Image (tube, rainbow, N blue to C red):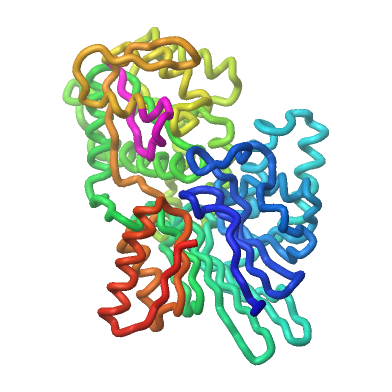
Amino acid sequence: MDFPVLSHHGATRGVTGSCHQLHLGPAISLLVDCGLEQGDDASPGAESASLGLGASFEVSSVQALIVTHVHLDHVGRIPALLAAGYRGPILCSEPSAKLLPLVLEDAYRLSISREPQHVQRYLAMLDELIVPLPFEQWHVLIDRPGLGCRIRLQRAGHLLGSACVECDVARGEVNTRYVFSGDLGPSTNPLLRPVQPAERADVLVLESTYGDRLHPSTDDRREKLEAVIDRALADNGTILIPAFSLGRTQELLYELEDILHRKALLNAGQASGDNPLDWSQLPIVLDSPLAQRITGVYRDLHEYWNEEARARLAEGRDPLGFGQLISVDTHDRHQHVVNYLKSTGRPAIVIAGNGMCSGGRIVNYLKAMLGDPRHEVLFVGYQAKGTPGAVVQASEGAEGFVQIDLDGEAYEIRAKVMTLSGYSGHADQHGLLEFAMGGATSPAKVVLVHGEPAAKAALSRALLSRAQGAKQQVEVSIP
């Protein structure tokens, strides 16, 4: 066998379970991500703690695990990897090194053990293995006669700390550069610096989540959010926003702070009678302990924000910790807030997990408020088929009697339902093409992963067409 060789242990059936192994020799390899397969992508047992990398997989051959970012579909099998005996370094960006223990601790508590002693032992092991790397600097992994390997992380714009991985492999006189895109973000993320494409790639392992579509314009995203809030205030209702704790929640808080800030400036000096909708009294409720902890890390790592976001801080504003933000920690306080908002009719915005309404604290809000037309459920993220979120979302604009089953009980949907586009965390086809083909040289080979079959096929055609138009040769494969 000629090395290096790529093999894939996920993200080939669909958009989850990213785990790619770069074999540098017969018994030496690297892993890029070790993610959980979720939803329809998962094979039987994949949602459990099983490693699921195949009988031929040898943990002892893995010299290092490199993490592109900390979403569970990229890191969710790390506990199983550790259980299988892996004790090598877990390399990731400096922000990811802060976020990864939070995400894996939450997953460990939910799926393995809540016993404090077990959790602390697990976290101590992670602390020993995680190696934070700065962006844009080469890091040597292997330096031995006849074989060398070094990696460099570049910003991917997907969430705080997300990275593309450049991997330079030298075998004898032959040097090959592999690039793993991880998940690429859009250019419109309000908090993060944009994607930084690799300067060169011989082999590009490219995500293809939105390889078959273009995102709608995000120019009016904030205006639409503001209009929804205006309507809810007029109805004395609560806006329920199901949102995942990592990434989407922080984007929402950032935009809500900006709306509140501008409203305060516009309303300054106006008589109260001129402004019946009092935005200054509108509570923004963040009801997710994990989201609160992650938001705290985002605030601490503001040096990784983009220029506009850092400028707000310089003005004395706190985009992720503003005065009207109320954080709900304990379950008792959560239940109190649910009952209070249901009974008082006071307007509020609630951001709660989980993002697809299949569990978490958002479910209690839905049970309490779906039957009241004063309230509104606002979706800002994808709702997977078969989830409660998808059922509620499908009722948008429906007439007549609509019900949903939550925890075995039927609830009538009379609340307003709206979907606000423009909050995708992934690059669209144009962004993927620019990442792959927009540099000085095109990759010789592109391997498409992390996408549905139709998205991969469409992106493959677009890549080949782009290469043909530029009179370049590119081989595209779909494992």
Q: Residue at x 34, y 70 (%)?
A: 463
Q: Residue at x 43, y 64 (%)?
A: 195
Q: Residue at x 64, y 51 (%)?
A: 98
**Considering depth in this image, is 430 or 22 the residue closer to the camera?**
22
Position of residue 47 relative to residue 466, above or below, is: above
Q: Which residues are magenta?
A: 374-390
User: Of all residues shown, which one is farthest toward the left?
Assistant: 274
Look at the image and tell me whether residue 360 can be seen: yes
Q: x and y percent of residue 162 in the render?
A: 52, 57
* Residue 66 colored in magenta in the image: no
* Residue 377 colored in magenta in the image: yes
**Considering depth in this image, is 96 or 316 the residue closer to the camera?**
96
Q: x and y percent of residue 27 in the render?
A: 76, 70
User: Of all residues shown, which one is farthest toward the top?
Assistant: 343
Q: Indicate the quadrant where residue 165 lies.
A: bottom right
**Considering depth in this image, is 51 or 149 the residue closer to the camera?**
51
Quadrant for the N terminus in the image: bottom right
Q: x and y percent of residue 107 in the render?
A: 64, 37
Q: Residue at x 41, y 36 (%)?
A: 384
Task: Give the tally of numbered discs.
Answer: 0
Q: Indicate the quadrant where residue 43 lies.
A: top right
Position of residue 82 relative to residue 354, above or below, is: below
Is 322 situated left or right of 300 in this image?
A: left
Is 149 situated left or right of 320 in this image?
A: right
Q: Indicate the quadrant where residue 457 lies.
A: bottom left
